[in-house]
Amino acid sequence: DAKTTQPPSMDCAEGRAANLPCNHSTISGNEYVYWYRQIHSQGPQYIIHGLKNNETNEMASLIITEDRKSSTLILPHATLRDTAVYYCIVRPLAGGGNKLTFGTGTQLKVEL
Amino acid sequence: DSGVTQTPKHLITATGQRVTLRCSPRSGDLSVYWYQQSLDQGLQFLIQYYNGEERAKGNILERFSAQQFPDLHSELNLSSLELGDSALYFCASSPQDRGSGNTIYFGEGSWLTVV
């Protein structure tokens, strides 16, 4: 599985956009980028995923660079409830049982 | 609410004992995954089942075993428990075992404390 690199922590003011970067320079053509978050000791929550096009849903937007070596998760209007650890995961969709391999993620702290 | 149900939510047991954690996947999901999260190890993949058959194995100890039943619920059995087995155990499920739409959803976990 391709490895990902994320900053260990970030701060964001409430109401502002939170932009969480992820580097996945060894990603291969059949691997998707997934984002999950974990609010303190709760089950990881699916946010969004994409292959090469930008994606948006009710929770967030995902921007993937053209060379697919990095991506950014955007929470457009962060709230205190968005404080969590955010995981960027590169996931193969064929073989390997399709599991998710979690790294250490980014601890996002949203403050007033 | 992800739709994945885990029981029990909390469990305290003694070293050397055996426990069973239960998971009911989301309605219609055929794959079940088990993860362990301890303070020093992060989220570790243990094992995956798809429609009753083992599909992938991760860092699962020999003292641990799992199975998925015909009704698709799954159980994780932990035996000869040690203090280091204290952790949060998550179950997750997905519709299939592969594919672009095969999003994995997690339950709220079972807290296991071994004393």
Image (cartoon, coloured by chain):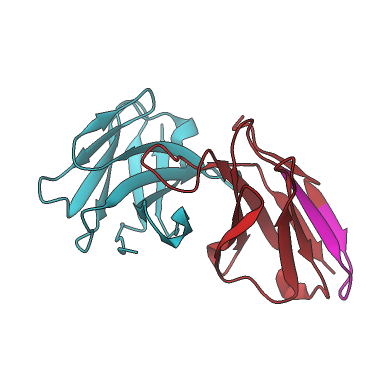
Quadrant occupied by the C terminus of chain B: bottom right
Q: Is residue A94 above or below residue B62?
A: above
Q: Considering only vertical position in the picture, is B14 above or below A77?
A: below
Q: Where is residue B2? Give x, y as percent.
A: 59, 33
Whether residue A20 is visible, yes or no, is yes
Residue located 72% across and 60% down the image: B66
Q: What stretch is highlighted in magenta?
A: B11-23
Percent position of residue A86, x then y: 41, 47
Q: Position of residue A21 (x, y in %)?
A: 25, 49
Q: Look at chain B in the picture and name its colour.
A: red
Q: Would you say the magenta stretch is mainly helix, strand or loop?
A: strand
Image height of B73 relative to B47, above or below: above
Choose between A20 and A3: the one closer to the eye: A3
B60 displayed left or right of A90: right
Quarter of the image where one finds residue A105: bottom left
Q: Is residue B20 magenta?
A: yes
Asked where in the image residue A95 lies, by quadrant, the reply is bottom left
- Quadrant of the image containing the N terminus of chain B: top right
Query: Which residue is outermost to the left?
Result: A66
Number of numbered callouts drawn: 0
In this rendering, would A104 be left or right of A22? Answer: right
Residue at 86% across, 67% down: B18
**Horizontal placement of B95 versus A90: left or right?**
right
Which chain can be seen in cyan?
A
* Image spot of residue A13 (x, y percent): 34, 34
Q: From this viewpoint, is residue B86 visible?
A: no
Instruction: Relative to A86, say whether A60 is above or below.
Output: above
Residue sitting nearer the eye, A10 or B78: B78
Residue A59 colored in magenta in the image: no
In-front residue for pair B67/B92: B67
Residue at the image position 45 percent from the left and 35 percent from the top: A82
